[in-house]
Amino acid sequence: MEGALRRALEVPAAVPGRFTSRLHDERVAAWLGLALGVCVLTAFATGLFSHFMQHPPGWARWPSRPVNLYRVTQGLHVMCGLAAVPLLLAKLWTVYPRLLRWPPARSVAEAAGRPLVLLLVGGALFQLVTGVLNISYWYAFPFFFTTAHYWTAYVLVGALLIHVANEWHKVRRTVLTGAVMTGPGDAAGRRGFLLGVAAASGVIVATTVGEAFSPLARLAVLAPRRPGVGSQGLPVNKSAAGAGVGAAARDPGFRLTVTGRVTRELAWSLPELRALPSHAARLPIACVEGWSAEAVWEGVRLRDVLEAAGADGGARVRVESLERGGRYRTSLVDPPHWRDPLTLLALRLNGEPLDLDHGYPCRLIAPDRPGVMQTKWVHRLVVL
C-alpha cells in the first residue's frame, strides 16, 4: 500500500525520457527572465504613474504638459503587458520541470523559496490575465480591477526582485559570461526558440499598438478600440444610454453652474455658453485600456469660466456629471490643469456639435489626463 501511494505521487520528472528538450536549460530561462523582467518593471513604473493620475494623493500636483505624457506612458504600459504574455508562457514552459519535480525542495533554503515562486508565478498570471480582460472590456471577475491590479503589482514586483537577487548568479554565469558550453545544434535550437518567442511578442504588439499610435491604426486588428472608429471619428467607452443621461442631457433647461468657494455663483444655459469666446485645441483622449486618439475640440476655456466666478487661482475644482452613479461621475482638476489655456469645456468635436455619446451638451477635455477624468455631460463645477 505504501509503495503504491509513493508511485501515485511521483510526477513525470521522475520518469526517464521526460523533459529531454535541451531548451529546459538555465541560459534560455535567463534570457527569457531578463526580457520578462524589463517588461514587468516598465509596466510597474508606468502603471504607478497611471494609478496616481487617476487617484491623485493630496500632495500631488501633476503637470498639464507635455500634452501626450499620459498617452505615451499608458500606451507603453499596455504594450509591455501584452509583450510579456508570450515571454511568460515560454518562461514557464522552460522551467516547469523544476516546478514539478519531486520532492519539491531538497534543502531548507529551497523550501523557503517555494512560496516566493508561487507568489511570482501567481502574481504574474493574475496581472496578465486580468489586464488582458480589462483592455478587452470583459469584466469576468467580481472585484474592482484597478484596486486589485494596483496592489498585486507590489506583490509581483517584490517577489520578482527577491527572485532576481537569488538567481542572479545563474544570469551572470549563463548570459553575461557565457560559461555554459553547448554544441552547435544546441545553440541553434536555443536561438530559434528565443527568436520565435520574440516574434510572438512583436506580432502581438504590432497588431495592437495602432490603438495608441494612430499611423499604425490599420494594423491594429487585435485592438478593442481604434482611432477613427466611433461616433464623430472617436471611440466611445461609455455611451449616454449606458450612463443613463439621455433625457437630462437633452433637457432644454440645462444649466452649467459654478458654485463653492467663489465670489459669485454663476449659471449659463447652452446658448449662453455657445455665445462665450470660443477656443479650439487638438488634444488626445487617452484611456487606461491603452487606446488613445486625437481630435479637435472647441469650447470655452475652463479658466475663463472659473475666473468669471472669482475662483481662487490655487483652488481645486470638482467637475460633476449628469450621470447619477459610477466611480468616475466626478473628477478633480488641479490648478496646473484648469489654468492651462488648452483645458476646455468642449461644445464641439471635429467641427461638429458634440455628440450625445461624447458628452453633449458639455464635457471636460484637458491635456495629460486619463480618459476617465475627462468628465462627460458636465453640469456643475464646484470650487473647493
Image (cartoon, helix red, strand yellow):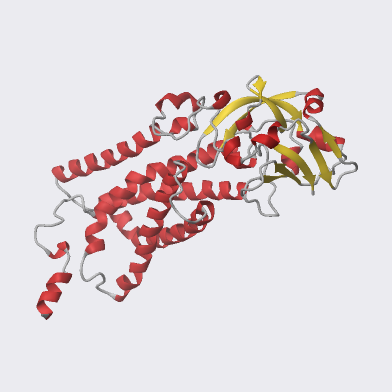
Q: Is residue 177 visible?
A: no
Q: Is residue 296 visible?
A: yes
- 176 sits to left or right of 8: right
Work out whether residue 208 or residue 329 is closer to the camera in this orientation and state it: 329
Position above or below: 204 against 318: above
Q: Residue furthest right?
A: 263
Position above or below: 57 against 319: below
Work out whether residue 265 or residue 278 is closer to the camera in this orientation and state it: 265
**In terms of image quadrants, where is residue 187?**
top left
Residue at x 90%, y 43% (from the top left corner) = 263
Picture coordinates of residue 37 (x, y %)?
40, 51
Residue at x 73%, y 27% (from the top left corner) = 299
Screen quadrant of the N terminus: bottom left
Q: Residue furthest top?
A: 351
Picture coordinates of residue 97 (x, y %)?
21, 59
Residue at x 46%, y 50% (from the top left corner) = 41
- 93 sits to left or right of 228: left
Count of numbered badges drawn on the protein: 0
Q: Residue furthest bottom?
A: 2
Picture coordinates of residue 341 (x, y %)?
75, 31
